[in-house]
Image (cartoon, rainbow, N blue to C red):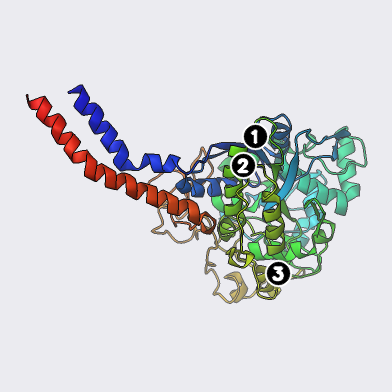
Amino acid sequence: MKRWALLAAVFVLLLSGQPAAFAQGYVPISGSGSTWSFNAVDQWRKNVEQYGMRINFAANGSSAGRNDFKAGQVDFAVSEIPYGLTDGGVKDVEPTRGFAYMPIVAGGTAFMYNLKIGNTQVTNLRLSGQTITAIFTGAITNWADPAIKADNPGLNLPARKIIPVVRSDGSGTTAQFTTYMANQYPGMWDAFCRRAGRATPCGFTSNYPPAAPVIGQSGSLGVTNYVRQPQSEGSITYVEYSYARNSGFPVAKMLNKAGYYIEPTAPSVAVALLAAHIRSDLTQDLGDVYVNGDPRTYPLSSYSYMILPTGTESPFTVEKGRTLSDFAYYFLCEGQQQADRLGYSPLPINLVRAGLDQVARIPGSTKKPTDINKCNNPTLSPDGGNALANSAPFPSACDKIGVTQCAEGTGGAKRPTPTSNTSAANNGGPGGPAGASSTSDGANGAGADSANPSDNPAVDAGGDVAIDPDTGQPVNARGGSSGALAQPVSLGLQDNTTTALLASLAVVLFLGLIVGPPILARVLRKEDR
């Protein structure tokens, strides 16, 4: 009977097609780094599992990721800042192993907050860069401050203490935010650094100075989960836009150079980054992004980078190069279609083209001949421009600095907040009736209108987005945290591998059906004797 059980198990394994999956030749790879980029990277790695790729990624922060790559502990890293910069008087030296930078996704560093007027959640807060800097350096400590009132003429904000929440770990998000403050408001930023015992001029830092009144939390999920708790009313943090959308919370509209308060949506980020200067190594200079005069611009927009190996120093191998290159080919083209739904902005076509050149430098790269016009990138335009930026809508009149204020919600909280000095149409969002909700632009239940209970299982009975307390992500239809998007993704760059997989599977099934029954019949006859 043991022989029969063993044979049956082998037969089932053959029919399952498992050998065909191994025939693809992908070996697992590992990476670490940016929590800012994690929601995009995590979705992409789940998507490519269907092709036999296993990508392990630890979201431990940009600084940790760069150190892991430098120490030879991971195959790749993801970071918002490059090597070679001096942070707090210490230079972050480059690795001895060969490497290159490759842009992977764009997005806006948002200011997620938890604030109420009475029992009504504020979802339409507006803040200038100067006010934001004053909040995170302790110069403004109360929500009723005149500077905040000037930004929000339609709201009667409470005299509640502000709780600024910052990253306690080394992070690219902190580096992006502090680079902005050092560039635009160096006086306030340096004064705060001096109180924290830092030398000035302070410049950028990936480790936020731990001085009152800021409170530190580790990771993007850490700051997000702190702010969204009921007992954290009055708090505000900086985090990638995706986290606020997924947690069902609003973000502040930020004042741009043209005098409009703008949300960090995919189009507003795409417009802002038209002013970015890309260096020869593909790193970015964002000075002109901060002061981009287009009224559709979100000032704190940036790119994130994957640090790729260009040599086979341990732990990288040529075999791993096949997995990493095909993963990169996937997310540079097909994966960019999901960027907006995930809370990011897709890379413009010039950076996709440059990224494809970097992929070819990976040892063992499959070096696929990619037709850039078939890349399925949402930014691709026939005239060579950025289609997403070209079609970006202009802000409403109530978003302009002055005595009016839009009521529509932002981020993951789309329910409008009634204002005292705008028209009924603006109180419901552009063109809508007073109190009406705007359409959500979120994904997986994020951004659902909290005023109306929904059939969406990611929305609870009270109409709010149901959040998994462990992950900070929306709960899916089966009650667990949301996983990969259900929509199947076509990997256009994997045609040869997919064809080989299907052919191998067909052969295995054919042999199993032809050879299997006689073998089973012979075994059964022997067992009957």
Q: Which residue is mark 1?
A: 316
Residue 264 screen position, x and y as percent: 67, 59
Amino acid carrying mark 2 in the image: Gly
Query: Residue 526 vs residue 39: left or right?
Result: left
Residue 249 screen position, x and y as percent: 58, 52
Helix, strand or loop at label 1? It is: loop
Query: Nearer the N terminus, badge 1 or badge 3?
Result: 1
- The residue drawn where x is 80% and y is 46% is 178
Between 241 and 139, the residue placed more toward the observer is: 241
Query: Nearer the N terminus, badge 2 or badge 1?
Result: 1
Report how far apart the C-alphas of labels 1 and 3 lie in the structure: 50 Å
Amino acid carrying mark 3 in the image: Asp
Report how far apart the C-alphas of labels 2 and 3 lie in the structure: 48 Å
Q: Which residue is mark 3?
A: 399
Amino acid carrying mark 1 in the image: Phe
Q: Are marks 2 and 1 in contact (CB under 8 Å)?
A: yes
Q: Are marks 1 and 3 in contact (CB under 8 Å)?
A: no
- The residue drawn where x is 66% and y is 75% is 382
Q: Is residue 250 above or below residue 296?
A: above
Number of residues whose C-alpha sits closer than 10 Å to that of mark 2, classed few (under 14), some (14–19) or many (20 or more): many
Query: Nearer the N terminus, badge 2 or badge 3?
Result: 2
Report how far apart the C-alphas of labels 2 and 1 lie in the structure: 8 Å
Residue 87 screen position, x and y as percent: 84, 37
Helix, strand or loop at label 2? It is: helix
Q: Are marks 2 and 3 in contact (CB under 8 Å)?
A: no
Where is residue 417, by image quadrant?
Answer: bottom right
Number of residues whose C-alpha sits closer than 10 Å to that of mark 3, classed few (under 14), some (14–19) or many (20 or more): many
Q: Which residue is mark 2?
A: 321
- The residue drawn where x is 75% and y is 59% is 149
Between 299 and 452, the residue placed more toward the observer is: 299
